[in-house]
């Protein structure tokens, strides 16, 4: 038993060390692919992706994503406990299900993990969220997020999304285009920023107004 326990502890320590080194590597090296990209590719989807540094992505898209996904991004340590509590309360009351995931959590999940709702995956997501919050800057977290997130079937990252949907570079996106891209993030294979339905149009207007608040209150300053 002692020998088994010793080997188990060695295995756990090795796994922890590997994940720390993996996260540290991605602080400076662009992730070559994500588990979701590989799963989609094996399922027959294409893979369109062009990595761009954050300074070559429109500031409007940064503001739109923060306004839509995580307005407290610059202020939390990876988890927005107020949003998580609100999500639990809404779900318990039978209201429309909503998540409480921050941009940091989404980045951890999309970069390192498989798409799943199991507690194992959620635990791993929490661990990687702590790692990237500790090892990366907020600017790096947002840069990775904007370069790996899915924006249509087989379309990943801001540059590929901007060219796919609007025929221009991510640097040239207007505030309206940025808002439309941010709106479809929860369901990018079902909603379209170029053929928006009533909900997407209405929600994009809300996001544009929130973008003004993000800029006024400096809610995206950590990504400057």
Image (cartoon, helix red, strand yellow):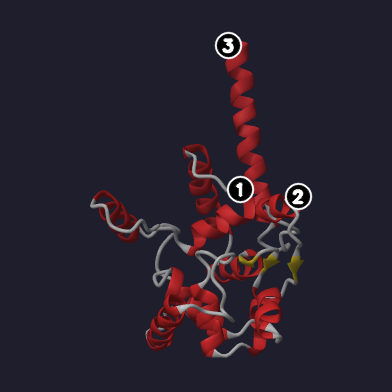
Report, in whole angstroms, how far the alpha carbon at label 2 lies from the one at label 3.
43 Å
Q: Nearer the viewer, mark 2 or mark 1?
A: 2
In the image, taking residue 100 as reference, residue 116 lies left or right, namely right
Q: Is residue 224 visible?
A: no
In the image, taking residue 81 as reference, residue 188 lies left or right, namely right
Q: Nearer the viewer, residue 90 or 63?
A: 90
- Which is more N-terminal, label 1 or label 2? 2
Report, in whole angstroms, how far the alpha carbon at label 2 lies from the one at label 1.
16 Å
| Circle 1: element type | loop
Q: In the picture shown, does residue 169 fall above or below 199?
A: below
Q: Are marks 2 and 3 in contact (CB under 8 Å)?
A: no
- Mark 3 nearby-residue class (10 Å; few <14, some 14–19, many ≥20): few
Numbered mark located on residue 113 in the image: 1
Q: In the picture shown, does residue 30 fall above or below 212?
A: above
In the image, taking residue 86 as reference, residue 49 lies left or right, namely right
Q: Nearer the viewer, mark 3 or mark 1?
A: 1
- Which is more N-terminal, label 1 or label 3? 3
Reading the image, the residue beneath label 3 is 2
Image spot of residue 211 (x, y percent) = 43, 84
Report, in whole angstroms, how far the alpha carbon at label 3 lies from the one at label 1.
32 Å
| Circle 2: element type | helix
Q: Are marks 3 and 1 in contact (CB under 8 Å)?
A: no
Q: Residue at x 63, y 12 (%)?
A: 3
Reading the image, the residue beneath label 2 is 42
- Mark 1 nearby-residue class (10 Å; few <14, some 14–19, many ≥20): some
Q: Nearer the viewer, residue 175 or 195?
A: 195
Image spot of residue 187 (x, y percent) = 52, 64
Q: Nearer the viewer, residue 32 or 186?
A: 186
């Amino acid at each position: 038993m002692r020998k088994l326990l010793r080997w188990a502890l060695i295995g756990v320590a090795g796994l922890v060390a590997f994940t720390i080194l993996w996260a540290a590597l991605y602080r400076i090296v662009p992730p070559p692919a994500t588990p979701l990209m590989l799963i989609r590719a094996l399922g027959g989807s294409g893979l369109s992706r062009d990595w761009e540094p954050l300074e070559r992505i429109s500031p409007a898209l940064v503001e739109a994503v923060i306004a839509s996904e995580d307005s407290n991004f610059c202020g939390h340590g990876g988890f927005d406990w107020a949003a998580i509590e609100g999500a639990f309360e809404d779900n318990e009351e039978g209201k429309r299900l909503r998540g409480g995931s921050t941009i940091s959590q989404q980045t951890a999940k999309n970069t390192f993990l498989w798409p799943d709702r199991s507690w194992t995956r959620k635990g791993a997501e929490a661990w990687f969220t702590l790692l990237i919050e500790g090892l990366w800057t907020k600017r790096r977290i947002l840069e990775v997020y904007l370069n790996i997130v899915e924006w249509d079937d087989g379309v990943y990252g801001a540059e590929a999304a901007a060219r796919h949907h609007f025929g221009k570079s991510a640097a040239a996106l207007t505030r309206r285009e940025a808002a439309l891209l941010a709106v479809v993030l929860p369901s990018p294979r079902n909603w379209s920023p170029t053929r928006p339905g009533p909900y997407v149009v209405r929600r994009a207007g809300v996001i544009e107004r929130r973008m003004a608040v993000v800029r006024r209150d400096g809610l995206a300053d950590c990504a400057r």
